[in-house]
Amino acid sequence: MLFASSLRPPSSGLTTPPLEDQNRQLSIQAILILTLVILGFNTNVLAQESISLGDFQSTLRTSLIGSTEGRAFTPNSNLRNLVRGSVMQFVPPGGANVDFEVDRVQLTTSGNLGVVSKVAPGKWMRILIHEDGSFFGTIVVGGVTYLVEAASGQSIFYSTADGTVAESPFANDIVEGTLTSESIAGDVSSTVSANPHVITVGILYDSALALADPNQLLYWIDSLIFSANQTYQASGANVEFSAVAISEYEPGSALEISEKLRFITCGTSSCDPSTVLENGTVSSWRDQVKADLVVQLTRTGTGGTCGVGWVPQSLTSDSVKVLGYSVSAYQNGNGQNCPSAVVAHEMGHNLGLVHDRTTQAGGGAPLYSYGYGFRLSEGYGTTMSYPEKGFSGYIPYLSNPNIVIDGLPLGEPEGSPLSANSALAATRTIPYFEANYENRDVQLIPPAPVLENVTSSSTAATVFFQSKRNIGQPTPTFFTANCGGTLISGSSSPITLTGLSPVSSYSCSVRASNQYGVSPVSNSITVAALSESEVQITEVYIGLQGRAPDPGGLAYWVNQLDAAIAAGQTRSSALKKLTNDITLSAEWDAGIGANDGLTQSGAEAIVRAMYLNLFDRPATASDVAYWSADLTTGRVTESEMVVLLILGAQSKGNADSQVLEFKRQAASYYSSNITSASFSRESATEAVADVTNEQSLLASQNATDALLASSGRSASDISDSQRIPTLPAGALLMLAGLMLLLAWRFSSSRALRSSGRA
């Protein structure tokens, strides 16, 4: 079975200023942000905080590919927000925190985010982050190398310290090849072109690896190609390795790794490529997919060896094609995991590169006299070398004397008696391998995404969808959402469309695209844009009551707010007045309102409760100090405070505003779908509790659907009039009279708590 594969793009607590400075500071911030946007700056990266890599767990588990146990690790859910200049924090087992500054960030065509730190001898990090937060990667620090494997939302850590990572993965990994029949390659320039040379790579995997989860296998393969590209490109080689096909092929499970190399090359485990024999099955597949190099992945290597590859002795067309094969293992024969650098190393041999001069002494020579790996002092070495420190001594570069790290050049210049410049040698051989095939794009247009949900505010809709691809296909790199002709594009779910008209219905859908074309349109979902009043009243309910509004209450207060605005009040003043009225309820007084805001302890309790309700986080010490002072001195009331918190967060567009919007969407979904008979304060509270991101929002909406199903109804059964019920005039008058009675009932206690407050 034959699959195709290739490369896709990536994605802020509220500290409120003193009240007398708030409007001025918000205006200054708004002007600053607007100015930066006009100038083309990305305001999301104005300030980068340190991001923890995640936390080790106490359990041991295996990855979805391997069988060796490693330490379970829960990655930070914000890792895909890393940008250049961000600081990744990693705490090794039993060690202190270590900071890694991000140097490069790249989204692969498979949709995984590659992050590379700045490199120092004995300290570097390279990880590839999946959409679920798990990652593959390598971390070198404190004399230990950590090899990280992804596994269903978690990652598994192996290390040289516990013996689960191969220390010398490239032992005995060269097989020299010569051909008796040679012809000179055609007109191939050895100069670097303005655009990268593309080396297409055909990937084969054996039957043992085929037992792994297919998506996990593709993710691992993506990490191998990412590692190779980063190593070569960072070293100055103008090349892009691109996986064009992935297929299962078993060369012989009982064969040693060098025998597997011979088998995939010429069809027998003891053949000599000089006979110009071919493995007919592999060769015809290679011709079909037009793979300049072929990499056979195998579950297990031999002894301590993780890979093996041919080293051509000339640049003739027959030599560079027939010897463009290598084998890389997931684990060596001792059960130790092999590093992702193995594929980069073995393809380096195919390109005519060899080990460092000390290791290579007495062995074969490179195609160019300077195509050696390089050993640095203190036991370190480049990718093609054998460092004295073993795997923990590797620096993820090809040798290049023009690259200096911590004052140490990574090679010796051409012409030197001990010259070592693998980057230059690779640059000069790569065009010959690129000429193996006249490559052409295989049309791999992605299938249509699945539209899962659409939520709305007064002027915006947020489209949630699931990207789809056939196994081996490149992941879509771009998505375009369409709601009633309004189009917005993005690189991942969700996508928010703005500029919609309040109280209008829109049919929404989404398309996916990659470098090969645009997918068919997805399924569609019709959504009604909420009114601005609906959004604001819902947010107030979340802050004051910690729950979604009941349908009747929402409709009543929206009508009250709209009527006040129609009578000439500003929206801000009308909202503050109605928010105060909402606090004149037994529910408020039994909840947050049970705390006396005029006392220090009561005020602090109110502040902490509102922060948890709105932003799902504890208030900071400065948050508590600032707002409790406002409450105890009477500068603001509790109802005014909740409005100011909401507006303050939204004006900053930080993490608090994002959490609040997720909670608001969950509350709106609940209130617009639930019936009065199904409503309860408990379920309304559960609808917004712990909702902080897309996953928890979808979980809340699923819980609402389950609640509807238990009552014999579904969201699709409920008409628009049932979602936002309206009340007849007589009922409104009755409710108004009831509210007057409630206001009189609580007026004496309210007067005590609001006296002296402007």
Image (spheres, helix red, strand yellow):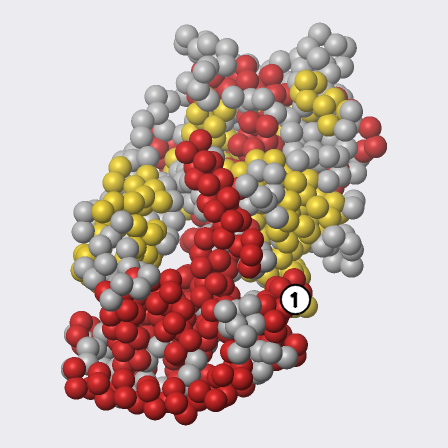
| Front residue of 503 and 244 | 503
Local crowd size for mark 1, using a 10 Å CA cut-off: few (<14), some (14–19), many (≥20): some
Q: Amino acid at mark 1?
A: Ala
Determine the residue positioned at 74% across, 22% down: 409
Where 151 sits versus 598, above or below?
above
Q: As drawn, is 725 to the left or to the right of 162?
A: left
Determine the residue positioned at 44% across, 87% down: 747
Where 121 sits versus 421, above or below?
below
Q: Which residue is mark 1?
A: 625
Please identify the quarter of the rendering in which residue 713 is found. Answer: bottom left
* Residue at the farthest right position: 378
Where 483 sits versus 120, above or below?
below
Q: As drawn, is 501 to the left or to the right of 546?
A: left
Q: Taking the image as drawn, is residue 746 in sight?
A: yes
**How far from the left and from the top, in percent, is residue 224?**
53, 40
Count numbered badges in the picture: 1
| Front residue of 163 and 155 | 155
**How far from the left and from the top, in percent, is residue 5?**
39, 40
**How far from the left and from the top, in percent, is residue 227?**
56, 37
Determine the residue positioned at 78% across, 54% down: 96
**How far from the left and from the top, in percent, is residue 721?**
17, 74
Determine the residue positioned at 42% across, 43% down: 110
Query: Could you tell me which secondary element the residue under label 1 belongs to?
Result: helix
Q: As drawn, is 634 to the left or to the right of 407?
A: left
| Front residue of 27 and 677 | 27
Please identify the quarter of the rendering in which residue 10 is found. Answer: top left
Please identify the quarter of the rendering in which residue 122 is found. Answer: top right
Q: Taking the image as drawn, is residue 208 in sight?
A: no
